[in-house]
Image: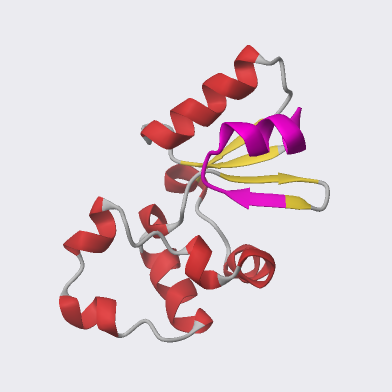
Amino acid sequence: MDVYGIPNCDTVKKALNFLKANNAAYTFHDFKKEGVSREQLEKWAKQLGWETLLNKRGTTWRKLSPEVQASVHTQADAIRLMQEHSSLIKRPVVEKGNTLSAGFDEALFREKYL
C-alpha cells in the first residue's frame, strides 16, 4: 500500500495513525520532498475525477488569487496547478492494488486497506 501526502497535514496524520494502530504495512510518499509526477496525477484524476483530487477546501486554495481559482476549468488546468502547489492535492491519496482513495474516512480505510 502506498500513502501519498504531507506529513504535517492533520488528515494525513489521522490516516497514518489509523494504519499504524491496525498494523497495516504501507510506504509513505511525501509530496513536499518527492513531488508528484504529471502522469501520476493524470492516473489519479482518471480514476477519482480531478474535481475530487483538487482540494478547494484548504488554506492553499484560499490563498490563491480569485483569477487563478477561476482559471481551473479542465483536468489539465487542475493538474498544472497541483504540480505547482502539491498542497492542493486532497490528502492522503492511498493506493492498494486497484483501490484508490483521496482523504481519510475510517470506515473506508477499514474496508479497503486492512
Vertical side of 12 occupied by 31: above or below: below
The colour scheme applied to this rendered structure is secondary structure
Residue 35 x/y as whole percent: 50, 53
Vertical side of 48 occupied by 21: above or below: above
Residue for point 51% across, 62% down: 53
Quadrant containing the N terminus in the rendered view = top right
Where is residue 68, by image quadrant?
bottom left
In this picture, which residue range is highlighted in magenta? 100-114
Residue for point 63% across, 23% down: 19
Q: Nearer the viewer, residue 109 or 42?
A: 109
Residue 47 x/y as whole percent: 69, 66
Quadrant containing the C terminus in the rendered view = top right
Q: Nearer the viewer, residue 51 or 16?
A: 51
Q: Is residue 13 magenta?
A: no
Residue for point 19% across, 83% down: 67
Q: Residue furthest right?
A: 97
Q: How many marks?
A: 0
Residue 46 x/y as whole percent: 67, 72
Residue 73 x/y as whole percent: 41, 86
